[in-house]
Amino acid sequence: MPKIILTVRLLMVLLAVPALGQLMGLRAPSTVSAGSSFSITTTGSGPATFYLLGPSHVVKQTIQLGQDLPISGSDVGASGSYQAVACDSVGCTSTAFYVLPSSPARLSFLVHPSRVPVSAGNAINATALVYDRFDNTVLAPTPVKFQFSSSGAAPYTRSLATARGIAWLQLGSSSKQGPLQVVASVGETAEPRVIQQVASEACGLRMQAASSSRSVRLQTDPIRDCSGNPVPDGTVVSFTKIDDAGRSTVDTPIKKGVARAQFAVSGRARISVACGVVLGNEISIGGEP
Amino acid sequence: MTRTLHLGGCLGVLLLAWATLIWRSDSPGGSVHAASLPKVTLNAESIGPRPIEQRTGETVTRNYAQAWQDLAESLDRNRTDLLNDYFTGKARDRLTQRISDQRKTGLRTRYVDHGHRVRALFYSPDGGEMQLVDQAQIEVQGFDGQKTIYTTNSTQKYLVLMTPGADRWYVRSLETVPDDATP
């Protein structure tokens, strides 16, 4: 009797071995490059429903188990974690794999600010974010070349490697006003940006006065910053007169490099000039200078 | 706000600086929905080149938690409109496409969120971008109709880019990355 039972059990095991070979299963590579076609190996037999679930895409299709399942590169454009799932009438099985970013192909380049005073240290921030052609952040360190060029100065280049897809730098503006072009490039991809370097605060602000019997005409010397750049037209210059009648101020924009104003005066007066935070000379009218 | 203070004889200024380095989404500064928000802890000890301001840290933490709450609900209910409040750019586009595909195929995904340990690593000098790495403990269940087709429960690493808007921080990029892909 025990022999019969043993024989039956053995027979059952032997019958089950081929069935075990038919168990439904999925095998995918652990990592795939974004946009690359590949295959998922399936085991088992018969029809099943296959699902591919990624960060931005879902595929659902009927498959025959036991065959290799081709996955199109267009189904794995977004990098990240994917789940491949197969379900038949008995149940479901799944496997996970990563889609990794492909090679660098795109740059997002941010430069701040768009206008900057000359000779300002670390005033310009440039940040480059490196992506592949599917807009995935390129995780591998990637050299980004920053080229700087402005009129009257020799161009120069700095190269930085990205960390987690980002390369950034700070730099100071030059002493000459005018456009500063910054080009960030990765391989064949380049993104240019232009920063306007404008004159800084006025430097050595001075005015001259021409008095008549009842008024005084004031005119500044050409207004420049400390690097010799003309302060832009439109910048407001304030002339302030203090006399027996009290204080009065005239705000006037720079035109063609100079600012002008006229005051009515009676008796002694003191007139001062200022541009932004910079004070110029002071003139006394009707008395000792 | 929960503050992590290292009291070992540091100067007051140093204490204040350390105090601003860790925030939690269930802090008093959270929204009215804070009770149902996923737990997010933001650690900014390694951030650079710009230091993070206290209010910015609180806002980023709360907004990131709100983004995950919206993400979970939108994937479960296949509603793309729920993505508009805290997602923008590529992150919103990708999730919108995923939800659109789920709707077409009759699928939905349920996220059971067990919390996020977030490290802020990059904050641009002009304050325009912040990069985070999130160790998220999330249980994911996929459904085809009423049938569960897969379940995973693991720690997943996300590389996140957030950018400021008028009154909040938006998730601009949310990418799962292998464990060894970032420090």
Image (cartoon, coloured by chain):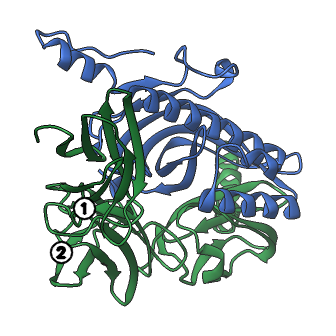
Chain colours: A green, B blue
Mark 1 closeness class: few <14, some 14–19, many ≥20 residues within 10 Å: some
**Label 2 element class:** strand
How far apart in space, not on screen, are marks 2 and 1 (Cα)? 9 Å
Tell me which residue sits at (67%, 35%) in the image.
Answer: B69
Disc number placed over residue A14 in the picture, else none: none
Query: x, y (%) of residue B80?
Result: 79, 52
Query: As drawn, which residue projects farthest toward the bottom?
Result: A188
What quarter of the picture does the N terminus of chain A occupy?
top right
x and y, in percent, of residue A140 in the image: 32, 68
Q: Is residue A83 visible?
A: no
Query: How far from the left and from the top, in percent, is residue A114?
Result: 40, 64
Instruction: Report the front residue among B90 and A64.
Output: B90
Q: Quadrant of the C terminus of chain A?
A: top left
Residue found at the very far front of the displayed protein: A213
Residue B67 occupies which quadrant of the picture? top right
Question: Which residue does the image show at 31% across and 61% down from the upper left?
Answer: A116
| Disc 1, SS | strand
The residue to which callout 2 is attached is: A158
Residue B162 lies, with reference to residue B55, above or below; the image says: below
- Relative depth, front residue between A239 and A109: A239
What type is the residue that disc 1 sits on? Leu
**Which chain letter matches label 2?**
A
Residue linked to disc 1: A169
Q: Is residue A114 above or below residue B127?
A: below
Mark nearer the N terminus (2 vs 1) = 2
